[in-house]
Amino acid sequence: MSLGVDPQDQVSSEALVAAVPVASTKEHGKSPSRIAFDRLRKDRMAIVCACVVLLFILVAVLAPLLCAIEGQNYSDFHTELVDEFGFPTIGPNADHWFGVEPKTGRDLFAQWTYGARPSLVIAFVASITSSVIGVVLGLTAGFLSGWVDRTISWVIDFVLSLPYLLVAIAAVPIVVQVAGGVNALTPQDNADIRFFVLIGVLVFFGWASLARLIRGEVISLREREFVQAAKVIGVPTRRVLFKELLPNLVAPIVISLSLALPAYIVAEAGLTFLGVGLIEPTPSWGQMIAKATTYYQADPLYLWLPVVGVSALTLALSWLGDSVRDAFDPKTRR
Amino acid sequence: MSSTPASGTPLLSVRDLKMHFPIKNTDGLFARKQVVQAVDGVSFDLGKGQTLGLVGESGCGKSTLGRAITRLYQPTSGQVLFEGTDLAGLPEKRMRPFRRELQMVFQDPYSSLNPRQTVGSIISTPLQVHGLAKGKEIQRVQELLERVGLNPEHHNRYPNEFSGGQRQRIGIARALAVEPQVIVADEPVSALDVSIQAQVMNLMEELRRDLGIAFVFIAHDLGVVRHFCDRVAVMYLGKMVEVGDREQVYTAPQHPYTQALLSAVPDLGAVRGVPPRERIRLAGDVPSPINPPSGCRFRTRCWKAQDICASQEPPLESKAEAGAGHSIACHFPEVKESLVAEASA
Amino acid sequence: ACGTPSSNNKQAGGSSSDTIGGAQQKATDESAKGPAKDIDGAKKGGTMTVYAESTPSTFDPTNIYYTDGNQIAKLAFRTLTQFDIRNGKPVLVPDLAEDLGKVSADKLTWTFKLKKGIKYQDGTPVKAEDFAYAIKRSFAHDVFDAGPTYQLSYFKDADTYKGPYTSGDDYKGVETPDDSTLVIHLKTPFPDLPYYGTFPMFTPIPKAKDTKQKYEQNPMTTGPYMWQSYNPGAELKLVKNPNWDASTDPVRHQYVDAWDFKWGGDAIKSQQQVLASQGPDAAAVEYDNVDASVVPQLTGDKKAQLLQGDSPCTIVEQMDSRKIPLDVRKAIALAYNWDEMNKVSGNNSLTSAPASSILPPAVPGYTKFSVAGLTGTGQGDPAAAKAALQKAGKLGFQLSWYYSNDSQTSSQLTQARTKFLEAAGFKVKAIGVPKAQIRKYTGNYDSPVNMLFSPRGWCSDWPSGSSWFPVLFKSQSVKDGNSIGELMDPALDKKIDDISALPLDQQAAKWGALDQDILQTYVPALPFYYDKMAIVIGNKVGGAVGDPTQGLPVFTQMFIKS
Amino acid sequence: MFTYLTRRVISAISVIIATVIASFALFFIAPSDPASAICGETRCSQQRYEDIRKSLNLDRPVTEQFAEYAGGIVFGRDYTDGGVTQHCAAPCLGYSFKTGQPVLEQIGSRLPVTLTVVLGASVIFFGVGVTLGSMAARRRGTSSDRALVGLTLVMSSIPYYLVALLVFLYLVISFPILPRPGYFPIADNGPVKWFLGFLAPWLVLGIYNSTSYTRYSRGSMVESLSEDYVRTARSKGISERRVTYLHGLRAAITPVVTIYGLDIAYLIVSSIFTERIFDLPGIGNLVLQSFNNSDLPMIMGTVIVGAVVLVVMNLLVDIVYSFLDPRVRLS
Amino acid sequence: MSQTSATEATSSGRPQTVTRARRVTNPSGQEPFLVVDDLRVEFPTADGPVQAVQGLSYQLPMGRTLAIVGESGSGKSVSSMAVMGLHDMRRTRMSGSIKLGGQEIVGMSSQGMRKVRGDQASMIFQDPQSSLHPYFKIGWQISEAYRAHHKVSKKVARNRALEMLDRVGIPNPQRRIDQYPYEFSGGMRQRAMIAMALVNDPKLLIADEPTTALDVTVQAQILDLLNDLQKEFGSAIMLITHDLGVVAEVADDVLVMYAGRAVEYGTAQEVLASPSHPYTWGLLESIPSVSTEHEMLRPIRGNPPSLVNLPSGCSFHPRCPYVDRVSGDQCRTELPELVRRDQLGTDASRCHLADPRAIFTAEVEPGLA
Ligand SMILES: Nc1ncnc2c1ncn2[C@@H]1O[C@H](COP(=O)(O)OP(=O)(O)OP(=O)(O)O)[C@@H](O)[C@H]1O
Ligand SMILES: Nc1ncnc2c1ncn2[C@@H]1O[C@H](COP(=O)(O)OP(=O)(O)OP(=O)(O)O)[C@@H](O)[C@H]1O
Ligand SMILES: [Mg+2]
Ligand SMILES: [Mg+2]
Ligand code: NI
């Protein structure tokens, strides 16, 4: 009798779904990404980290509101609240929730909440932009091969063999000068330019490693039989790229995105700390840290506020990234 | 089914097909361009509804041949004639209509399905690409699933929810979607367990019988080929060394390599009281296809090799004494009675 | 001279009492002879480490003009004359010269008798022509562009002679009639020449050893110490010069075995270290002014580690009198919130005192007076300023300046100024430029801003108003790029010339009066603060005193306590 | 193998050339006006300004200037300023605006410090990381393993410069547990002082980075311990220790060593934080100083040198890798 | 597959001739070197315990070859690795008894186990590519195995390695001994593995699918080699495979495993020629053969069960076409014992069917080649 239409076989193939160990027995029709996200949702650590990140995002977004409630802003000087040597004469109180900054007497709570903004904005904008560029170039290089691949690969090599910190330092003054005749710029313009330079530098160095990763993935996927099958069917190249390959790159993309975020926050604050990143009057954690190192003994809160901000945010993001990787790639589970 | 060779123009005709891969040699200062002669001048015909089995050792070019036929590779030279049209040189655009006629089933049930697509969308992709069953894709997908023995309700599941055998069925359904005339099956069952393998074999048998699809069936399991195919071609190092009807090749092999290959297959005869056959044990391994031996490529492992084998390449020609449609590429073909004793039992 | 390059952000100077120390008199002691008087408790031996954040730009004696380089150079380069700091007061004494120079009747020829038997560190004798060569070399101002420039305006043929590299050795301005006589010819009288003689450009340089820009790597020294190694921007190491003869030197000692100057480290960190005096830091000096954040640690024993002294510098807020009308300048003065400016700058009583004059208290002629609004104190009165501005019909007058956008202090000061100036009805346009280039912008008087040009302050080149007013307030100062207020008033020029022509001993009081006159009449700048020296030293540093001529410690008298 | 290396060398050189071109191009893209940068700080006469422009060949076409610059790298070149000619030997990357000295000379004088810091720390992080990592891999799943993994994760998530800064502030300054960092050349100060001066940066950089090495080597080790050949080794009846530390580690260490090589290069070009925080006169501080001085040739010089370090190290790692992995060596 | 619904053949009682024997003794009757008794291996996982091997018993005398066959995942490798003590005991639960030359392996200290491994018993694996350490030379790897059990100099060990390489038919061993594994072809690698396994003259050689990754011609070479070596050394060989052809050619005894249990055990002759378990029948029927030209094969339907969630009763019942021949729900509810089929033969099977032989002869055998 014919097996194909054997009713018995129908039964057995039903039964078999339960028998295949890899299959989730309860729900069907879940894409691998869905499964990964479900896994992530069950990871308590991931949820806690996501909440922390969310909290910081809220603080950054609601900074004006929070400061309005406090009744302060980040730019007003309160020199009457510091003594002759610049030390604050007041601690945290009802007017200034976190106290005031040495020397200028600016409100620390406002500085801190606004300081969360550049970190988050730069990290998100830079990581998303660099991911898009990385994915597009990686896909192109990997799939097209030939001279396109060679060119892109060379550029990747080139970018990756530039010393990132040094170039970041070199780029800032150059771009600032390119950006406009010095005489045309207000202090705010200057600060904004630094902001975009920082994003640019991070993107410039960020895309390459993802592109390399994606290229490698594409090359290995390209040899996978389902891509061959698509070709045999006559699926056009663009469709192969975006419908067959791209969905299979979700895991590396999500993972690298989740690792890029904390890395960029660290980079932003680090460059700013060195004095080559953001500048006054943009409030930022990196600047606060740099300024506060001189006051760490007399005014530890001033130092610890931004330190805790940067650390907690990167810690939460890194752990979240780790959980994301585990969720997408359970083999590497700790 | 009887194995009458098709008359008239064959459905698929391969003429002197060559597939050479350029590789970079990494020895020495300057990279010398070398080629892997993965397939080197292969010809055969395939009639409607016919099945041709391709057997041979690993690396002899079976998959490459299959891929060159389906134009996954652009053949180096030679022709692939489908109903008289040469596909070998066709640009991809003009190739598109022929893709409907010529499909492929792959070996690895895990990598041949896109893990990010539902079974439904995997099977409907060919429909969309070729504009088939417009508006009724879901019905068609369910029909196909049913055809290959899967529950049609499962079209919205992902491949990871299926077992190896079921996945292979999905792959077959995908190939069937465009109603092809020829399916190139590259080791479709070698990754499966015996019991599952038999299920899939049965399915293919059925398709062939019901739909009249012709198969180029690649396998290294000689038993499977023997079971499934009308004609069998034996490949060695990119060349066909022997081709003929199943009975001819299995019961009266004339090429020493075919003989050695067949005698190496372990079988159940021993426990069934069949007298042991003579065994030919080949020494050594298959030479590299980068620098194949001159003349007859098998001569380095052949016990019958003589000087002529090194200097002159034996053509694949039908020998009158061997029977119609039975061709052998050997300077000294002969039937070894001691070898075939068991096969007739 | 200008302060150290860092004096823009770090403040310098200060005296021990709250009241500004009285003006020093121009003191000279022609009879001073070596060896210098021993210091009580002085010990020999050890290595002294000296830290500073900003780097002396050069150690080529011809090129040194900044106070830091100048002060360090005294350890190695002997000059015609030198200051001996006696009880905190500078006394001009002969150094390599036998006397303080003899001037001819027409005041245009100076003759210096030179000491005999002076040797370079390699034992070769110092010759008079080496002094002549050094002076000729100073005319190569294209090569040694940072050096002092008085010779360019006072010396004979200064406009035609371009130094030995381009114009050859034939220069009529110097003569060496014999091996121990140096004759200098002037084109205009220069009574302060003996003071000018303290500058390192008057150290002898043998022509054969001149390697131009490379000379600073291996200079010929005559002082108690000589080069061991020099890594520009990072480190200078000095060791004892065996051919220095204490008996010829009235000002220098050779107590310490070696000096190790380290630049570029963070000032605050270095100060912390010196204050902690762990290991080698006990014998260390950090000569940047003490940071406010370190001040709370200066209690108990550590109090002794603060070295205070006077500094010959005044810091001002300049206004371009060509672009800002007088009544507007006066309105600006009303608006200034000095308390905020001081706090944001990090000024405090250790490092600064509010300024109300151009001349600092350390310079003879300093007169205490007070012009309304120009006292460097108070919170300003934006309302009054606004009223004044309105009265002048200049409401919304635009004020603009350059600031260093990569310096926190500079940016914050700009924010502060912007606030109170805007409150007083001004429009403000502040332009941020990199710290490293700020002087290029502020030094260009033709740039499209109208405030805060350089110099931001001025330090005496020698204790006299003559190193201030003729340099800063004459019309030609604008051309020279050394103007405060960009005043170009022939009447003022004449007043200054008249005082300059007076005998030295009559000048001081006149300068003081002129100071008040200028501030009252022209308001070319708002006096901000007088600089003071307040630095930290290791707890084993002995003999540390301040040098009021430089606003820095006197290195030549330091020793290491056991 | 040989061709492979040749090809790698060629591509490395092409990258370096591109870096040189790019950094040269930046001089021109940026209206940084090198002449005025060199021309003193305040008073720069038009005459002198023009002289400098001439001496820098800024009045000549860009291509000619580049030829001069590139020539300087290959053959060295002369530099004339104010009638004084200086020679800059073969790989000449130009002159500092600030000090007028050849860029490479200055970098060369700072390099030993940076190398000492990085290499010293690298010994620590490699040793500690690999030891802890392979121990954790052997005890995979135990609570001590999990604790270690968690700890390394926390550590490596906190930015390095914060860790270094806090250690410096609290353990060096406030509670002087660690000796004061600084560069005291052996020749002048003897090895003890030299050693103590580097101790704090070594420890901080070393221990901080060891966390990621613990993770790498643990992961690599876990993987290699699950390989078939480890099972084979075990089936021979050799001791478990030998199985782990010879068979397992031998395979696990190879990828770690390559990361190690690249990391050393990376740390050399990014030692800015360490040097800035611990006040060490290395390359990083030089760059920072040059940045503050707008000393473009110096910055570009360090970028080029940094790129060379990275490229060369990459190459070196490839070569070393081929020695570590016979499959690569002989293929 | 076609089958008549001959339910009448299934009687409620069992024929008297069946002897119940929970422990099946050695089919060949010789003194066994390896005695496995009621072996259970379980892996605790997140989804629940994986019962990889359950109640497995068999014996293997010197000089004989025991083949273990079964579908993928049926526990073949797990059971053989248990004999070598290669499981990570932190993640494995093991019970029962394995006696190797009289020595109990289960629960043995790792020290003791080390002495046994590679000396008394050694093992070769399926994939010679990944089973040889890629970073060490072949000769080194072989002599390491020798030195682990013999206190000899490196030189002696190397000579021993040379000798072994020569013995397993590697041409030019002098040169090959200093090569790395990847310089060998697949067949040669497997020969080298065998050389390494035999370097200490073990009494038991376990070969876990030694030829699955190889081509037929090379497979034939390797099987011949094993055969020759066994003749020479007289060792016991345990051969794991899923190719019944290989079993027929080289095995003396056969153990058929299904879902972690032995379902049939006997001499090769008996098990392959007249099997008495429906699963074995299914395996035989699944093998394509030439005589049933273009007929449908008769595969076992469905898929092997999950080891976490075994079917109740006989594990094979969901796939067994003969369930209805057993009265009531016995197959679904009751686990059959592994019982000897008749007193003459040694074949034992785990099935509720009353007279499987009869069914085989009547219904299955005619369909086979
Ligand atoms: N893309 C390629 N580039 C270079 N060489 C190739 C390529 N594809 C295949 N080859 C080589 O061509 C030869 C034939 O390979 P092919 O995959 O056709 O063998 P096969 O008969 O299918 O073997 P198997 O039974 O192992 O699948 C092999 O030596 C292989 O290394
Ligand atoms: N360490 C382990 N942890 C959990 N499950 C395991 C482990 N090792 C083996 N298994 C499971 O035990 C079952 C039996 O595995 P085993 O390797 O013995 O199968 P096999 O019969 O050798 O199959 P194959 O023919 O594929 O080699 C499988 O389902 C496998 O997934
Ligand atoms: Mg193939
Ligand atoms: Mg197995
Ligand atoms: Ni058939």
Image: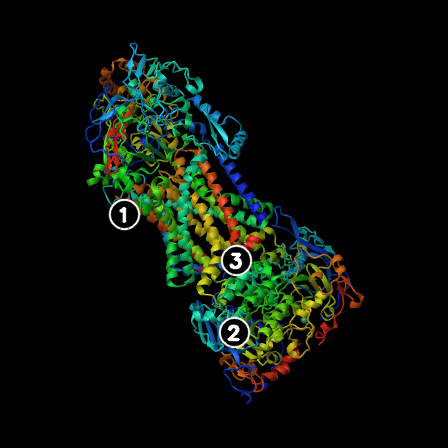
- Front disc: 3 or 2: 3
Q: Do labels 1 and 2 share a chain?
A: no
Pick the quarter of the image with the C terminus of chain C.
top left
Q: In the rendered image of this protein, does residue E115 appear above or below residue C550? A: below
**For the view shown, which residue lies furthest in the top direction?**
C105
Q: What kind of element bears circle 3?
A: loop
Name the residue carrying label 2.
Answer: E259
Residue D260 location (% of width, % of height): 45, 50
Q: Residue A67 appears in which quarter of the rendering?
A: top left
Cα gap from disc 1 to disc 2, whole angstroms: 66 Å
Cα gap from disc 3 to disc 2, whole angstroms: 37 Å
What residue type is disc 1 on? Phe
Q: How many labels does the image show?
A: 3
Q: Mark 3 and mark 1 in contact (Cβ < 8 Å)?
A: no
Name the residue carrying label 1.
Answer: D175
Cα gap from disc 1 to disc 3, whole angstroms: 49 Å
- Residue C298 visible in the displayed image: yes
Pick the quarter of the image with the N terminus of chain C.
top left
Q: What kind of element bears circle 1?
A: loop
What residue type is disc 2 on? Ala
